[in-house]
Amino acid sequence: MKSLARKTDLYAIAWRLPMLVWQGLFFIGPLVFMVAMSFFLVKNYRMEPAFQFSNWEKVLGRGFFWDSYFLTLWLAVLATCVTSLVAFPASYFLAFKVKDTVRRWAVFFLIIPFFTSYLVRIFAWQVILAQQGVINAGLSFIGLGPFTMLNTKFGTMIGYLTLCLPLAVILQTFSLAQIDKRLVEAAHNLGCGRFRSVFTVVVPLAKTGLVVAAVFCFILSFGDFVAPYYLGGSKPPTLSIMIIDTSKSGQQWPRAAVIAIMMIVTLLTVAFAAIGYAYRKRR
């Protein structure tokens, strides 16, 4: 029995080893190096190994960092809420109102945007949202506009939706499709209206999938560089833009590492808290 257990353990370790090596080389290793680099010093545009907290003091002690931090956090939270609310009706329709064949085709068409570069799609939105773009040209026919949509927070939000909405619909659809429809029918038979059944039956049963979809939206939005730069005008900068600006300013890679570490800590905190809530069972 002991030899069999040892063989089983070796077999399990052998299958897990490639994943552990991958995570160690491409996640843990760079993360450890970035933490160490945050304590380095830059002299004459060259990094020198050291262990000083001057980079942390200069970054965290300045108000413009915290302005960018809370701006990035606010935009990511807003994008997550808007994306989740916009995606839910579409996901509900695909999960409960159409046949399996239609649902599969819908998921396929939702995946198609990922075949093209996200940067290309953002450049397409630049043409659409411009002062003389497609939307303002259409509004001019009814005597409205032109409206300034490019280089605004609205443009940034459009970019975030372009990035997150298809993924949110797919994840929510998979979660809602797993719900036993007989439970919804039972709620209707007991006098529960459609809207009430959605909030008292459907949403609690699909809570895990809905929260996971929201977490993905937050992670993608919080770390995105393209949308706030090309559609939001980059002023005031988000943290991702600040990393680029800091690394270009006197080769201050250690200070950029501090900003990146703050972003990673925020993402891990939000992700673990959300996943813990998603998988927490009701008492």
Image (spheres, rainbow, N blue to C red):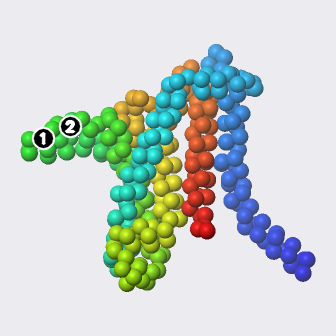
Please state which of residues 164 and 214 is positioned toward the viewer in this rendering.
Answer: 214
Please, what secondary structure does the residue beneath circle 2 have?
Answer: loop
Residue 57 spot, x, y in % from top left: 64, 23
Residue 147, numbered circle: 2
User: Disc 1 to disc 2, how far (Cα)?
Assistant: 8 Å
Q: Is residue 181 visible?
A: no
* Image point (33%, 73%), residue name: 194
The image shows residue 185, relative to residue 131, as above or below, that is below
Position of residue 191 measured from the top left corner of the image (x, y, whole percent) = 36, 80
Is residue 62 something that shows in the picture? yes
Pinpoint residue 213: horizontal percent, then vertical percent: 48, 59
Amino acid under disc 2:
Phe
Front-most of residues 272 and 30: 272
Task: Please tell me the numbered disc located at residue 237.
Answer: none
Depicted 142 relative to depicted 202: above or below? above
Q: Residue at x 51, y 34 (%)?
A: 69
Label 2 Cα crowd, 10 Å radius (few <14 / some 14-19 / many 20+): some
Residue sitting farthest toward the top: 44
Q: Quadrant of the C terminus?
A: bottom right
User: Residue farthest to the front?
Assistant: 191
Tell me where residue 106 sits by quadrant. bottom left
State if disc 2 and disc 1 touch (CB < 8 Å): yes
> Would you identify the image quadrant in which residue 108 lies?
bottom left
> Taking 97 as reference, is 45 above or below it?
above
Identify the residue under disc 1. Answer: 144
Element under label 1? loop
Q: Residues within 10 Å of mark 1 (few under 14, many from 20)?
A: few
Q: Residue at x 14, y 44 (%)?
A: 139
Q: Is residue 160 left or right of residue 69?
A: left
